Image (spheres, grey):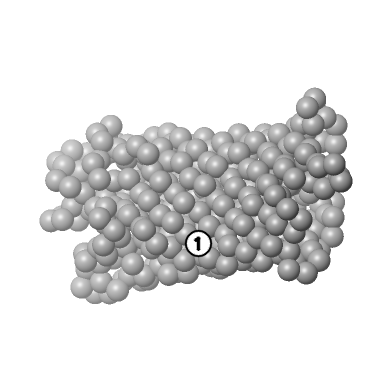
Amino acid sequence: MSPLKYLPACLVLSFASSAVFAADGPPAPSVTEPSGINLGGTSFYDGFAGPPGLSHLTYLKFSTASSLRTNSGKANSAFDNPKINVITLINQLSYYSPDTIGGGAHLGWSLLVPVVSLDATFGSNGPALQDNATGLGDVTVGPQIQFDPIVDAHGRPVFVQRVAFDTILPTGKYDKHKDLNPGSNYYSLNPYWAATWMPAPRWEVSWRLHYLYNFKNRDPASSSQDSFEGKPVSNSRAGQSAWANFTASYEVIPNVSVGINGYYFRQITDDQINGDRLSDSREKVLGIGPGMFWKISEGQGFWLNTYKETGVENRSRQDYAVQVRYAHTF
């Protein structure tokens, strides 16, 4: 059997829910990526964290998907007229100390709390996935180290970076009888490295490199099936992944930059059900689009990001996504 996998939606700090489909049978229990991963949630000037102290960030994102893709990148014909809309609101508290621990490094921490609204509809000539409406998503928390900017001979910042060691906690709303849930029902480790390089005045290039390690879901969700390949389903496990958020922008007027923002996600190990590897289950996607950043003040910033996806395999393809983000340092 060569299973087909789809991913219904991606959120601000990416909500995702996936399921395995056989060509001749109903959906197996879903294998989900955690709701806390960041696909394009952060973008321009990502290496900076604002002034030392406590910051509050708010993210609001809308995305819509009307195409579910197979491992060959083609639309999955099993679904009739799918449409999945996702609205996500995330509140983040972030802190780093003004005191250095050496080498320009400052200790800190971050906490993100998402609320997710799901609305999935399908035509009558195929399977229909059940959504779990609106609820709390998975909380992401972890320590971070923010470095002071490296400056040139004129005092202009040219490079700044941060490393973080996030853990995604299974705090979100979850119903084992629903296919699409705000929560993932398992723990994940999600370290990252964020950096910004300013090669010339008014120019900026940023990236955030992620790694994701998922633990087992011991109560997989499905609205229609309790077994897989003739065996009761006791657990599932989403594969490990790596991805990058990336940007390039130019300051068109003082404190306002416009440019390109994107992300490239690739799953590097297969999903599992009952400890058995699911072949052809690895996801891949490239999202890219225009965006802008407005530095309101030293302690305030505003971002607008838009994305459209291409090169999609084993997940849904977003028709478009729009996100606004606001940061304020107390």
For image coordinates 28% across by 32% down, the residue present is 275
For image coordinates 25% across by 55% down, the residue present is 72
For image coordinates 73% across by 53% down, the residue present is 200
For image coordinates 16% across by 42% down, the residue present is 229
Vertical placement of residue 207 versus 142, above or below: below
Q: Position of residue 136 (x, y in %)?
A: 55, 54
User: Badge 1 is on which residue?
Assistant: 288
Which residue, as the protein is rendered here, is positioned at the far top? Answer: 102
Query: Is 205 left, or right, of 218 in this rendering?
Result: right
Q: Position of residue 166 (x, y in %)?
A: 59, 37
How packed mark 1 is, by other alpha carbons closer than 10 Å (few <14, some 14-19, many 20 or more), is many
Query: Is 285 left, or right, of 324 in this rendering?
Result: left
Query: Is 13 left, or right, of 127 in this rendering?
Result: right
Residue 219 appears anywhere in the view: no
Picture quadrant of residue 27: bottom left
Picture quadrant of residue 239: top left
Residue 50 appears anywhere in the view: yes
Vertical placement of residue 298 versus 244, above or below: below
Judge by depth and name the residue closer to the eye, 157 or 225: 157
The disc labelled 1 sits on which kind of residue?
Ile
Judge by depth and name the residue closer to the eye, 231 or 314: 314
Q: Position of residue 15 (x, y in %)?
A: 48, 54
Question: Disc 1 on helix, strand or loop?
Answer: strand
